[in-house]
Image (cartoon, rainbow, N blue to C red):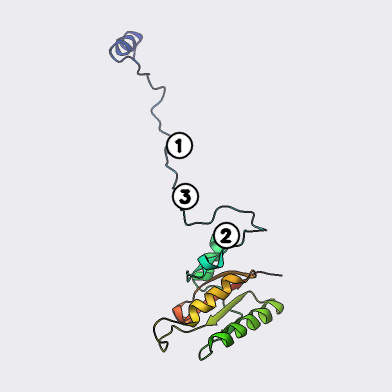
Amino acid sequence: MSDDQDDDFSRMMPGVKRLEHDRVNVYAQRARKPQNPLRHPPSDYRHPPPAAPETIAASAVYFDAGLQKKLQRRIRQGLIRPEASLDLHGYRRVDAVDALDAFLERARAAGKRMLIVVHGRGYRSAGEAVLRPLVHRRLAERGDVLAWCPAQPRDGADGASYVYLRLR
């Protein structure tokens, strides 16, 4: 564009500046994804704040805020094979909690991190399942449990839970 054309253009379009180049930076125009309000706030990974057990126990899935997303995915997909298992079929509530606590203590003492707890789906229970929410509530109360989620179909589906423990 010549200087005369540039002056004519400037008179006809006041407030509009001529572009120096026609390239667009697509990365600068990208909108950021909105933060998920249900996600845990960022925290110090070495000392995550304790979660309220009553809010966690209602959920069938829990991952500590300091657990890497890749590790969470591997746990959910059952790619980390359980090192020990506990079958709570036929247990009464009190006995199930005692057996779960003893199992977690033995596993932790043996240095095992990935566990599977078979609690059943509650088909024989009158009304809702009894052991599954009981197990999840107890896992929420323990500080050494970093994650739990339903198992893959080959390991019992929603009748079992993968449990991932914190190292000593």
Q: Sort mark 3 into few (<14), some (14-19) or many (20+) by Cα contacts within 10 Å.
A: few
Name the kind of residue labelled 3 in the image.
Answer: Gln
The residue where tag 3 is placed is 35
**Residue 65 has which mark?**
2
Q: Give whichever of discs 1 and 3 has the lower sequence position.
A: 1
In the rendered image, the residue lying farthest to the left is 12
In front here: 7 or 117? 117
Name the kind of residue labelled 2 in the image.
Answer: Ala
Q: x, y percentage for residue 91?
A: 53, 89
The image quadrant of residue 21 is top left
In front here: 54 or 9? 54
- The Cα–Cα distance between marks 1 and 3, rounded to whole angstroms, is 19 Å
- The Cα–Cα distance between marks 1 and 2, rounded to whole angstroms, is 30 Å
Give above or below for 40 relative to 27.
Answer: below
Nearer to us of marks 1 and 3 is: 3
Q: x, y percentage for residue 87?
A: 54, 87
- The Cα–Cα distance between marks 3 and 2, rounded to whole angstroms, is 15 Å
Which quadrant of the figure contains the C terminus?
A: bottom right
Q: Residue at x 47, y 84 (%)?
A: 120
**Residue 28 has which mark?**
1
User: Which element type, helix, strand or loop, lies under badge 3?
Assistant: loop
Q: How many marks?
A: 3
Q: Sort mark 2 into few (<14), some (14-19) or many (20+) by Cα contacts within 10 Å.
A: many
In the rendered image, the residue lying farthest to the bottom is 90
